[in-house]
């Protein structure tokens, strides 16, 4: 059973993150079972896990749906991220181990190289590296409570999906913020690291907001 649950969880999660299942899509257990090749029981358990992570929402008497967020909800999430991750960066700059700082620099440089290469999977790979970058900083802050708060506030599927809305210019600016955060970590300057992280999160919100406006304008013109 556990292998079937893991298979169902991984395939549904990947389909959500890649946009195959769009926000608001109805996730029907029987259709998912046929698609993945497992029974409905592991599908049900996988959907519960995804619900706990924030990627799926259950509507009473209607079943499971891919989670959707209003722009106001997204704004709230990024406001909270700025507060919490700014604080995490301040603490991490004082506590980060040399190996972790080296890993942060490697990830920052890798993301810039991926953006420059411009391959079809570049943004997906950047999103993965970006996730690891931010996780290292939160872990290096050295407070379990902060990690728990971040898990409640930051809904990973939302962050990964909206990452693909960045314009090329906004993406390049975001990736260079990472390098400046690493520079602050290397000299253990918490105030600098926290300030850049807060600016980084604020810029992310505006990139997403601008992308949403552009989508609305295109839809209106069609």
Image: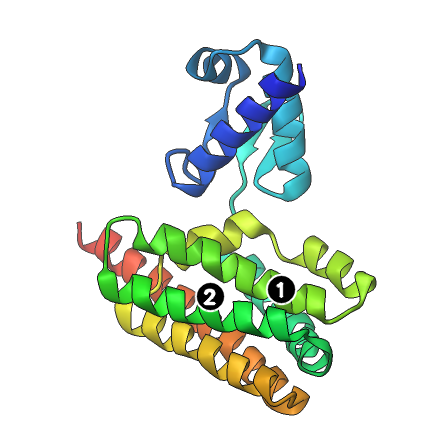
Q: Which residue is at 54% across, 23% downward?
A: 7
Between 35 and 28, the residue placed more toward the observer is 35
The residue that mark 2 highlights is: 107
Q: CA distance from mark 1 to mark 2?
A: 11 Å
Residue 95 seen = yes
The image position of residue 100, as x and y in percent, is 61, 69
Left or right of 129? Residue 169 is left
Quarter holding the N terminus is top right
Q: Which residue is at 43% across, 72% downward?
A: 206
The image position of residue 143, as x and y in percent, is 80, 67
Rendered position, 62 above or below 112: above
Q: Quadrant of residue 85?
A: bottom right
Left or right of 107? Residue 167 is left
Between 208 and 186, the residue placed more toward the observer is 186
Residue farthest to the front, as pictured: 99
| Local SS, label 2 | helix
Rendered position, 57 above or below 115: above
The residue that mark 1 highlights is: 136
For label 1, the crowd category at 10 Å Cα-Cα, with few meaning under 14, some 14 to 19 and many 20 or more, is some
**Labels 1 & 2 near each other (Cβ < 8 A):** yes
């Amino acid at each position: 059973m556990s292998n079937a649950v893991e298979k169902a969880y991984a395939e549904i999660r990947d389909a959500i993150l890649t946009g195959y299942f769009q926000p608001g899509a109805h996730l029907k257990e029987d259709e998912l079972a046929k698609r993945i090749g497992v029974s409905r029981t592991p599908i049900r358990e996988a959907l519960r896990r995804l619900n706990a992570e924030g990627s799926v929402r259950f509507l009473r008497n209607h079943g499971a749906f891919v989670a959707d967020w209003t722009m106001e909800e997204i704004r709230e999430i990024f406001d909270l991220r700025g507060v919490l991750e700014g604080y995490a960066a301040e603490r991490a700059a004082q506590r980060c181990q040399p190996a972790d700082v080296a890993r942060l620099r490697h990830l920052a440089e890798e993301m810039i190289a991926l953006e420059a290469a411009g391959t079809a999977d570049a943004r997906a790979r950047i999103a993965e590296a970006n996730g690891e970058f931010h996780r290292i900083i939160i872990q290096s802050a050295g407070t379990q409570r902060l990690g728990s708060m971040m898990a409640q506030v930051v809904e990973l599927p939302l962050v990964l999906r909206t990452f693909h809305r960045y314009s090329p210019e906004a993406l390049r600016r975001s990736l260079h913020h990472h390098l400046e955060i690493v520079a602050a970590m290397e000299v253990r300057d918490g105030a600098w690291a926290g300030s850049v992280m807060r600016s980084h999160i604020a810029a992310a919100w505006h990139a997403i907001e601008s992308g949403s406006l552009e989508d609305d304008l295109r839809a209106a013109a069609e």
